[in-house]
Image (tube, helix red, strand yellow):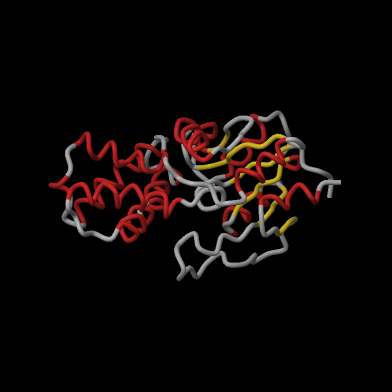
Amino acid sequence: MENPKAYIFDVFGTVVDWRNGVAKVCAETFAQKGLSFDPHEFADLWRGEYQPAMERIRSGSRGYVPLDLLHYENLERILENTGLASQFTASEKSELNRAWEQLPGWPDSSPGLYTLKQQAIIAPCSNGSIALMTRIAKFADLPWDCIVGAEIAQNYKPHPDAYLKSAHALGLSPGEVMMVAAHNEDLHAARENGLKTAFIPRKTEYGTGQTKDLEPNDDWDLVVGSLLQISRYRK
């Protein structure tokens, strides 16, 4: 395999620990308000609205809007469903929505990206907006060269545009780009659109009871246990 000229990364779950990051902010907010709702359960409920919200855009039933807005709409829905809506003002909901900007990287993420950055272009190919990816990068010390993904494509993964327009934005053909993800579904879509693929398991993304994406389910170009390992496969 020729060395990729660029590596693009799924972010939520692959590079950052969204569940514990969101739960931490929720725990602090709930404590301030004297609420006893489990913060990890709330994070899971919030994330559970993620795919349905994006599917309405991928299917064409709604025009593209950034994930920041979808997260806010999903937050309103979960607050209603859990009976907590009356406890939050609009400004407090907006502040809680910023939990998605405060996600810690996995221990290998920052050092792995800094190492790989010396060898190739690195960029997030996330469903997050440019604004959201920028703030996460500042929070978690992620040294991206640029930001591609959903906002560039005006559509959400696994729609082909998310991969193809990201490669095009980098001035590269799909075969010159490697998609790195902890989600097999993401890699299937990337491969179908001509990208190289690398799988890294994040076995506690959904907590200790995680049942999916524990291992690769296809013959991906690379399977690594740490982002630090990716650079070792370059010739």
- From the top left corner, tell me how far across and down residue 137 is, in percent: 52, 36
Q: Residue at x 80, y 51 (%)?
A: 233
- How many labels, in total? 0
Q: Nearer the viewer, residue 92 or 108?
A: 108
Quarter of image, res 110: top right
- From the top left corner, tell me how far across and down residue 56 is, in percent: 39, 46
Q: Nearer the viewer, residue 103 or 71?
A: 103
- From the top left corner, tell me how far across and down residue 140 is, in percent: 51, 40
As drawn, the residue found furthest toward the right would be 235
Q: Is residue 63 above or below residue 76?
A: above
Q: Residue at x 60, y 47 (%)?
A: 109
Q: Residue at x 73, y 50 (%)?
A: 230
Q: Nearer the viewer, residue 153 or 111?
A: 111
230 lies left or right of 84:
right
Q: Nearer the viewer, residue 170 or 39?
A: 39
- From the top left corner, tell me how far across and down residue 158 is, in percent: 54, 49
135 lies left or right of 199:
left
